[in-house]
Image (tube, helix red, strand yellow):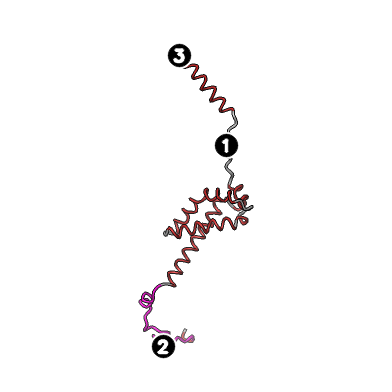
Amino acid sequence: MSSDSFRLGLRTSLNSSLAAESLPQKTAAVPSDNDLIVMVQRGNEEAFGQLFDRYYVVIRSVARKILRNPEDIDDVIQETFMDVFQGARSYDPARGKLKTWISYLAYHRSVKRVRFLKKRMWQTCDSDETSSVLDPEITPMSGSGPLILEDL
């Protein structure tokens, strides 16, 4: 009697699992990168959100390899996604994958940020540091006399 109930239970579970497999599954279709960028080109903000979720980690890792300050990294991420949204029409799938294009934008944004930071640091250095580098005794006329082009 117990074996009959076991068989009945097994048969019922098999039938229910087969019935579930035969029913059409409602799966959420994940759009491809090309589909997403086409939708972003049309101004679809939901597609841009999906693109953000998909490539946030990629952009962050590119920026972290170049920059160290978390605020600068966050700025680069934001600027890169602004570039993606505003320049989506410039993406050409024939020239490469979307991931490559976005990584390229992130890399160049990071390099621009480093150049900006170095320039700002150079411009804002205090006069004590500058005076320690410059020797006030050295003038264009000091040394062996004025430089005359005929001597060269």
Quarter occupied by the N terminus: top left
Instruction: Based on the picture, tell me whether residue 127 belongs to the magenta stretch.
Output: yes
Which of marks 2 and 1 precedes in the sequence?
1
Q: How many marks?
A: 3
Residue in the image at 39% along x and 74% along y: 126
Three-letter amino acid code at the position of disc 3? Ser
Q: CA gap, disc 1 to disc 2? A: 84 Å
Image location (x, y in percent) of residue 84: 57, 56
| Mark carried by residue 145 | 2
Which residues are drawn in magenta? 125-149
Badge 1 marks a residue whose secondary structure is loop
Q: Is residue 6 left or right of residue 32?
A: left
User: In the image, residue 66 lies at what x, y percent?
Assistant: 45, 58
Residue furthest to the bottom in view is 145
Residue closest to the eye, 60 or 151? 60
Identity, as a three-letter code, of the amino acid under mark 2 = Gly
Distance (Cα) linking label 3 and label 2: 114 Å
Residue at the far top: name it: 1
Q: Earlier in the sequence, mark 3 or mark 1?
A: 3
| Mark 3 vs 2, N-terminal side | 3
Mark 3 residue element: helix
Disc 2 is placed on an element classified as loop
Name the disc covering residue 3, or none. Answer: 3
Residue denoted by label 1:
27
